Image (tube, helix red, strand yellow):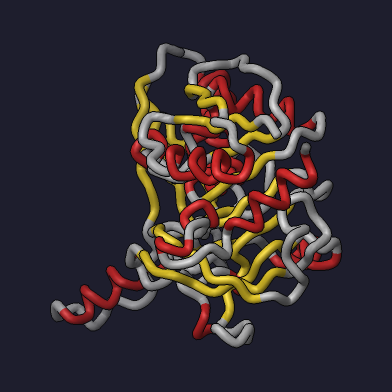
Amino acid sequence: MKARVHVTLKNGVLDPQGKAIGHSLNRLGFPEVGDVRQGKFIELELDETDKAKAKARLDEMCRKLLANTVIENYSIELVG
Amino acid sequence: MKAAVLVFPGSNREGDVAQAIELVTGRKPQMVWHGDGDFEKTDLIVVPGGFSYGDYLRCGAMAALSPVMAEVKKRAAQGVPVLAICNGFQIVTEAGLLPGTLMRNAHLKFVCSDVHLKVETSQSLFTNRYQAGQVIRVPVAHAEGNYFADQDTLKRLEDRGQIAFRYCAPDGTVDGTGNPNGSIRNIAGVFNETKTVMGLMPHPENAVEPMFGGSDGKALFEGLVEALT
């Protein structure tokens, strides 16, 4: 099955890249854009059919490598 | 003092720090490749600067999981001193040897310049040749040096005297003007609880010869020699 992992900065952690993106969009004629937060999207192919098992393994992957839990949150989505 | 300097694919300051160590000890350190899970016992392990594994995913994230770092974690737990500079600092925070993390510089630019640092304590292997409150000048060169830790961690670090260096103005004032990257509370370097692991973003190894613009970093290496020989 396929999995999608989203890694985002925790609330309260300054995101200067998100800020820069927001400013650029404002300058480009999108004044409706307010706060912007940038994150990461990681797509993984898994050799696993059991959803619960896959989720547990992905959780471990996130904690060990994909996210830095000092500053980042992650969410896991299983597809197909 | 016998030292080991780790080398990852993408390290680029390992030669500089090896030279600084040779300058004060008269002997070349052992260079240890990232795939080596075992290496000769040494009095000091140095994790140098650079762009290990191309800084993929997050700076230091991949290197923190390399075979050599598994061994470094074991030895650090036994009390072997570890000096982690720049990318090395990023690697050891990712490896959990030091608290906090290094984020993208607040102004988003790579910063390459001399900075002033206030020495927070002389009570460590790494800073015993400095005076507490002394101001030194050393270079920085990084895009991700913005130290961050949550409030509880910061309080713990400060209560236990685990801050090694803070960015400051030339006169020692710790405020925004001397802060090159947005680091929280101007933190440039920290210790672990036992003060046997120190990580810092600036490069003391690039300030050991007056003809290259300053030698304020040399005392760090001299202090290590004194403590570990």
Q: Nearer the viewer, residue B150 or B62?
A: B62
Residue toward you, A2 or A25: A25
User: Residue at (56%, 20%) from the top-left corner?
Assistant: B67
Figure quadrant of the C terminus of chain B:
top right
Q: Position of residue B4 (x, y in %)?
A: 60, 30
**Residue B38 placed where, x, y %?**
62, 14
Q: Position of residue A20 (x, y in %)?
A: 31, 71
Q: Is residue A50 left or right of residue B73?
A: left
- Name the image quarter holding residue A15: bottom left
Residue drawn at x 72%, y 52% as measured from the top left: B223
Please identify the residue farthest to the left as the structure is shown: A28
Residue B106, percent across and down? 43, 70
Q: Residue at x 57, y 41 (%)?
A: B21
Query: Can residue B221 be seen at all in this image of the molecule?
Result: yes
Q: Nearer the viewer, residue B140 or B223?
A: B223
Looking at the image, is B7 positioned above or below residue A71?
above
Name the quarter where the N terminus of chain B is drawn.
top right
Image position of A70 (left or right of B88): right
Q: Is residue B17 left or right of residue B78?
A: left
Mark yes or no: residue A68 visible.
Answer: no
Report the front residue among B151 and B78: B78
Residue at 46 percent across and 30 percent down: it is B7
